[in-house]
Structures are given as C-alpha cells and as structure tokens.
Image: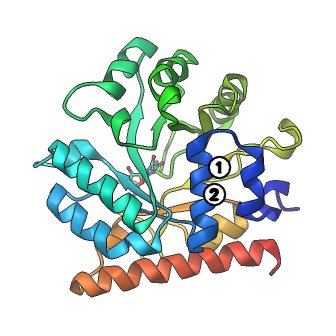
C-alpha cells in the first residue's frame, strides 16, 4: 500500500513544515507544477548559467557542485540568485558534507565558496554522527536554510543501505525538522510506522533518466515514474539526461520540459488524479 505522505498534494504538506526552505520548495512545486530538479554539473560557471536560463522555468530547484567550476567567482552566485528570483526556483549546493561539526560549519560558511550565503539547501552524509547536523545548523538555521541527509545513494555497491539507512533516518528525526527537511534517497526511508501525524519529509531522488540505464562509473538510472509512483520520491534530480542532451540550446530546454511533464504526470498518478 502507498506511503501515506505520497497521497497528500504538495501544497497541503506546507502546513507540516516550519523550515522556510521546505515551505518555499513545496510552494514552488505547486505553483509551477514541477517536481524536477536539474543538476548543472558542467565545469564552467558561465555555461552552467546558460543551462539555468534554459531550464529555469521548468524546475523547482537548481542543483550545483560549485567546486567543479573552473571559473567560480561571487559573480556566479549573484547571477544564480538573480535567476532564482526571476525564474522562481530554489538553489541546492550538493556539497555532501562529511566531517566533524566544527569543520563542516567552516566549510559551509567560509572559504572561496561561502555556500551558506547563497544556497537555500545543502546535504550531508550521516557518517560523522549528529555533530554534523549541529555544526551545519549553527550556520544555516539563522539564515533559513535547509539540510538533507543522504539516506541512500543511487550508485552501485553503495554502503548506505539497511541499518545505515535506518540510523540515518533516526538521526534526522532526533535532530528535529527545524533544519533537516528530508533525504536524498531512492525510497521512502521515512517508514510509515516510524513517523507521527504530520511528520513530513521531502524525499529527493537522483539517478533519473528516460533513456540511459546507467553510466560506466556505477551510476544507475530509473524513470521518473519508477521514482515518483513506485518509490514515492517527491523530487526527481536529473543531470546529464537534460544538460547533456544533443541538439543545442533548444534541445536542453525541451528535454527539461519533457522531464517536468513525466515527473508531474507520475505525481498526479500517485494522487489518483
Ligand atoms: O543525472 P546525473 O547522473 O548526471 O547526475 C546525478 C547528480 C550528480 C550526483 O552528484 C548527484 O545527482 N547524486 C546524489 C546527490 C544529489 O546527492 C546522490 C546520489 O546518490 N547519486 C547522485 O547521482 O550531481
């Protein structure tokens, strides 16, 4: 039987959240009819912004790996922020923090990237224990930011399975939902028997492709329907399937729209519409 959260429309889940970023994501999803996040994993910040201009209207979220860019400057984040307001999306820096609380608080706030100053959402591995949440929360919570824990991964042979996944869920639950708003996962790891009334988490799934089944480095793809209907994901994250499509600027734009439609159709199917 379907997970109870997946039977509730995105807009109706807003009332279960206090974190401003969680609320913003759900509002945008409802307003723009999209559960698509695009990952712009190109090595040029200039090129990344071009992709964002093409796909921005189709997405609820733009995901970055700012340490990939050869030409990263604060001007990049200024323009990304401007586009996020113009085209109405949330920014997710996929930093995958994985150190002790003190170190991650510095990595989040400082250095060249100053992630906390421009990224609405970021993510962290649970390996170090709850101190990682405390360290990131110290920086991000006053700014209204949100955090996702990695409960599972899309790659073959991942160690984030079974008891690790269960303990990651428990760690998030113990931290409370003021800052931790959900998970990167392949399934609804917030098992119905483990959650209380109104305890709502956002599940975001990478490893999504309409044509490829994987890559040569362990990535594994599922369709938007498999993610959203069969596994109950709330957001689908697509990288190469969109920015890597052949055929130039217009092809990237129309591919984003194709994934948006597939993701939204799957969402309506799970609601029984
Ligand atoms: O669609 P792709 O394969 O081109 O890109 C998938 C994106 C990449 C990965 O770093 C990221 O999603 N990712 C993550 C995230 C979002 O945390 C976790 C994971 O398990 N698998 C995965 O691919 O930017």
Q: Is residue 183 above or below residue 135?
A: below
Q: Quadrant of the N terminus?
A: bottom right
Residue in view at x 55 percent, y 81 percent: 261
Q: Nearer the viewer, residue 55 or 244?
A: 55
Asked if residue 272 lies left or right of residue 222, the reply is right
Q: Nearer the viewer, residue 233 or 164?
A: 233
The x and y percentages for residue 39 are 37, 59
Q: Which residue is mark 2?
A: 26
The x and y percentages for residue 264 are 62, 76
Residue in view at x 38 percent, y 85 percent: 254
What element does badge 1 sit on?
Answer: strand
Number of labelled discs? 2
Q: Which residue is mark 1?
A: 202
Answer whether residue 211 is visible to the viewer in this image: no
Mark 1: is the Cβ under 8 angstroms from ligand 1?
no
Q: Mark 1–mark 2 contact, CB under 8 Å?
A: yes
Residue in view at x 47 percent, y 18 percent: 135
Q: Quadrant of the C terminus?
A: bottom right
Query: What mark, if any, has residue 51 been given in the picture?
Result: none
């Amino acid at each position: 039987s379907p997970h109870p959260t997946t039977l509730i429309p995105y807009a109706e889940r807003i009332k279960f959240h206090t974190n401003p970023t969680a609320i913003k994501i759900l509002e945008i999803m409802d307003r723009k009819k999209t559960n698509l996040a695009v990952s712009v994993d190109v090595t040029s910040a200039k090129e990344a912004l071009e992709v964002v201009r093409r796909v921005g209207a189709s997405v609820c979220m733009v995901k970055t790996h700012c340490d990939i860019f050869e030409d990263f400057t604060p001007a990049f984040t200024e323009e990304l922020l401007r586009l996020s307001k113009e085209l109405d999306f949330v920014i997710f820096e996929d930093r995958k923090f994985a150190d002790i609380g003190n170190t991650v608080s510095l990595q989040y706030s400082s250095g060249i990237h100053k992630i906390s100053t421009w990224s609405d959402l970021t993510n962290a591995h649970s390996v170090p224990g709850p101190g990682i949440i405390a360290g990131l929360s110290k920086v991000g919570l006053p700014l209204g930011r949100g955090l996702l824990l990695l409960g599972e991964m899309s790659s073959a042979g991942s160690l984030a399975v079974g008891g690790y996944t269960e303990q990651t869920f428990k760690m998030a639950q113990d931290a409370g939902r003021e800052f931790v708003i959900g998970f990167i996962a392949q399934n609804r790891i917030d098992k119905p028997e483990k959650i209380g009334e109104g305890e709502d988490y956002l599940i975001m799934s990478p490893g999504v492709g309409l044509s490829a089944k994987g890559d040569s480095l362990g990535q594994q793809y599922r369709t938007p329907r498999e993610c959203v209907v069969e596994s109950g994901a709330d957001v689908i994250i697509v990288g190469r399937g969109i920015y890597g499509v052949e055929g130039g600027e217009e092809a990237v734009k129309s591919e984003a729209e194709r994934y948006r439609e597939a993701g939204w159709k799957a969402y309506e199917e799970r609601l029984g519409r």
